[in-house]
Image: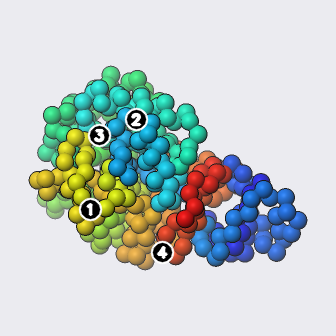
Amino acid sequence: MKAIINGKIIVEKEVLDNRILLYSDKIMGFIESKAAGELLQNCQEIVDAKGNYVSPGFIDMHIHGSGGYDIMDGTEESLATISSIVAKNGVTGILATTMTMNREKIYTALDNIKHFMGKEAQGAKILGVHLEGPFINRKYKGAQADEFIIEPDFSFIEKYVDIIKVMTLAPEMDENYKFIKEVKEKTKIILSMGHSNAEYEQAVKAIENGVSHATHTFNAMSPLNHRNPGVVGAVLNSDIYCELIADKIHVHPAIFNILATIKGMDKVILITDSMRAGCLHDGISELGGQKVIIKNNTARLEDGTLAGSTLRLNHAIKNFMDYTGNGICQVVKLASLNPAKELGIEKDRGSLEVGKYSDIVILDEEFNILKTIVEGKTVYTY
């Protein structure tokens, strides 16, 4: 048994003071500090939070890379490094996110992820795959490679339905929503609308047939117009989950509050969409085989197209809190409990509750990460 003392513990609706968090690989309980006494003497490790916040670990549902490595490298070294680096940002779980590349490269990445998921995490745990493309629309391809975009085909993913948790697609490319229907019938994969030029009616029909998620909302999708509401209109006018890149670059900060007001705080999920250049300095990088220029924390292709981000998830949460005025319990769940619920793992992860895995982060008021714990094991200490 281990214990965290002197922390302000963030649970779903309040911050607990004068409590001690007891844990092993799973959370064992919360006791009043004054009642600890002999119990602490039996702990194999006591972590002093020194008055800082004790938060559930963050889950990044959309991340391509960090620290000079990319999921599409297809190597164990890349996954291990990305996992270790993002843990420094308070991330305890990720969906390894692929790119629109050739079939062989995608399969190599998926095979590598499947193999790596069976190993004990030395950083953030890989919870599965977010397959972004190749079933997207060229008009809104963003930084995805045009030549590898194809029409939806269930046989393309059939071998990997056990590890694919989310899949981004353009529903207007799926004739009569045949692919969407087949995925919903045969798998538990979350279908996400993104890189799409769908008209409002097409997007609504896709949601009716099983799409329940929006990829980096507002970015790479047909925008809201009062005569043509587009994908954005359908997303805002439904109860599906919305990813948001809250870096103040991909969307204006005013959008944070607009989205929270319209969708509610239970349906927004903060992501990074971080690429290889995440956690690095300005310079030249790469994404999906394309040159990317990093300047002032912004990643762009040579033609100026935004190419993912260098955002850190703890910074995204802080940005959202600063520009919406929501309290810490409300904003933390956008990167913890909300993604856990969307992924169907809220019984095991996403909040600090007895019986859930001990995915825990200690952070200060500026969201600087001081310690990250994954399934009871400390994987990062500042």
The residue under the point 66% across, 57% down is 353
In the rendered structure, the answer to whether residue 204 lies left or right of residue 270 reads left
The local secondary structure at tag 1 comes to loop
Image quarter of residue 21: bottom right
Residue extending farthest right = 38
The residue under the point 34% across, 64% down is 246
Sequence-wise, the earlier of marks 2 and 4 is 2
In the rendered structure, the answer to whether residue 42 lies left or right of residue 70 reads right
Frontmost of labels 2 and 4 is 2
Residue topped by disc 3? 99
Q: Amino acid at mark 3?
A: Met
Sequence-wise, the earlier of marks 1 and 2 is 2
Residue topped by disc 1? 282
Residue 216's x, y, as percent?
Answer: 31, 54
The residue under the point 53% across, 49% down is 123
State whether residue 51 appears in this view: yes
Sequence-wise, the earlier of marks 3 and 1 is 3
> Label 3, label 1: how many angstroms apart (C-alpha)?
22 Å
